Amino acid sequence: MAFPGGVFSVDTAERTVRYRACDGDTGRVADPRMRVAGGTATGQVTAGGTTYAYRVPLVGRTQGVVEVSRPHRQPDRRIGEVVTDPQPPTDPAAGRRLSPLTGQLARVAATATNNRAGVAVRDLSSRYGHQQIAVNGAFRPKAASVIKLWILVELLRRVDCRQLSLDRAVRVTRDDVVGGTGKLKSEAIPQVVTTSRLAEYMIEYSDNTAANVLIDQLGGFAPVNALIDSMNQRETVLAHKLFDGAADRGGENYTSPDDVVSLLGAVWDARILTESSRDLMIGFMRKQTRNSKIPAALPPGTPLAHKTGDDIDASHDVGYCLTPGAETAVAFLTAGPSRTGSETVRQLARTVHDYITPGCAPG
């Protein structure tokens, strides 16, 4: 359930809840007395001396409520829209017109014999009733640099909560510099940079050094994983810094098409970020300089905001197709040889574009 400044997540299978907002984070709390009946979860938990009484319908696009009671203060009510993955379409009839695209994407994925592929697509324009479709949506490859989107969202969430400033000066030293993609490593080091420039470099140049410095500024992996957990994105985890060899020691970063589109949809709808932070994030993604996948597959000038991910055995591209009247969130993830995976991403991207773009699409 999303409300201004936070979320309240409910896991009915595990009987757990989590409240995470600018004014606090309960962590994942067990509620063995949670009642699930009539399509609604109700219950009450206490954490850190604060009580959270909730009534949350389990169907997307309905309203839920959490009453927050602190000692010696009047209770506060948090009312918000329930978000599920996927959300029900706003117009089921229009949503059904997107269904043939699922078969087309499945055929492309099936022909990628050297790679396993997963795809998720969400209509943002209402042309298809905000329908979401997926092929292998729970597919869980290495996240590669796609994980940087969660780092950015947690950073901007802190900015929205006035807990952190984009103007904060951060000293980057030689010890911070890592290999792989990026621009900072080619600049004068040590240097003092703003948090804003670190965030921009992390997305525009897929800068690994900037990403790692921002992880440290946020306080490590835990806050990013708290964001992931609060959104019930079960296939995604940040377990190591970028390009630091930690994956070889047993930790790996993972994600899935469904989780990526869940994040992109929440950002687009200004549910997890304010509109100004949403616009800043999409602005960074518009300036992405690694353009050999989705942009290379589409007609020149197609408006896009995207983020790539690359590893020796993974090739991804995710983001927003921003053609007016056909705005769409997409996630194309592959595992296997990077070269053939990139070609699969291009084929998937062209398939989506040709279906949804006015003048090209059968719908």
Image (cartoon, rainbow, N blue to C red):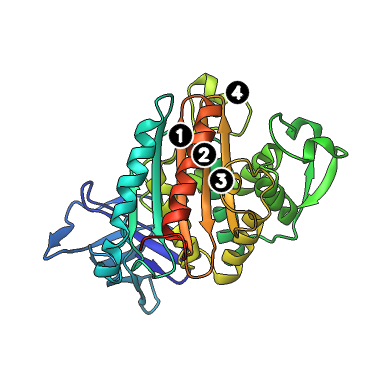
Is 31 left, or right, of 268 in this rendering? left
Whole-percent x and y of residue 117?
A: 40, 35
Instruction: Please state, as top left, top right, bottom left or bottom right, where the C terminus lies in the image.
Output: bottom left
Q: Relative to residue 180, is residue 58 drawn left or right?
A: left
Which image quarter: residue 292? top right
Residue at the farthest bottom position: 74
Q: Estimate the spatial distance between the alpha carbons at disc 3 and disc 2, rounded to whole Å.
A: 14 Å
Counting residues from the N terminus, which is met first, the one under dot 1 or under dot 2? Answer: 2
Residue 53 pos. (x, y %): 27, 67
Q: CA distance from mark 3 to mark 4?
A: 32 Å
Toward the viewer: 188 or 313? 313
Location of mark 1 (residue): 334
Q: CA distance from mark 4 to mark 2?
A: 20 Å
Tell me which numbered mark, 3 or 4, is placed earlier along the sequence: 4
Dot 3 or dot 2: first in sequence order is 3
Q: Nearer the viewer, mark 4 or mark 1?
A: 1
Judged by depth in the image, the label closer to the viewer, 3 or 4, is 3
Amino acid under disc 3:
Ala
What residue is pinned by disc 3?
A: 297
Q: Is residue 147 left or right of residue 89?
A: right
Q: Are marks 3 and 4 in contact (CB under 8 Å)?
A: no
Point out residue 61 in the picture as x, y percentages from the top left corner. Answer: 30, 70
Instruction: Count neighbours of disc 2 (C-alpha within 10 A) and say few if under 14, some if 14 to 19, many if 20 or more.
Output: many
Identify residue for label 2.
316
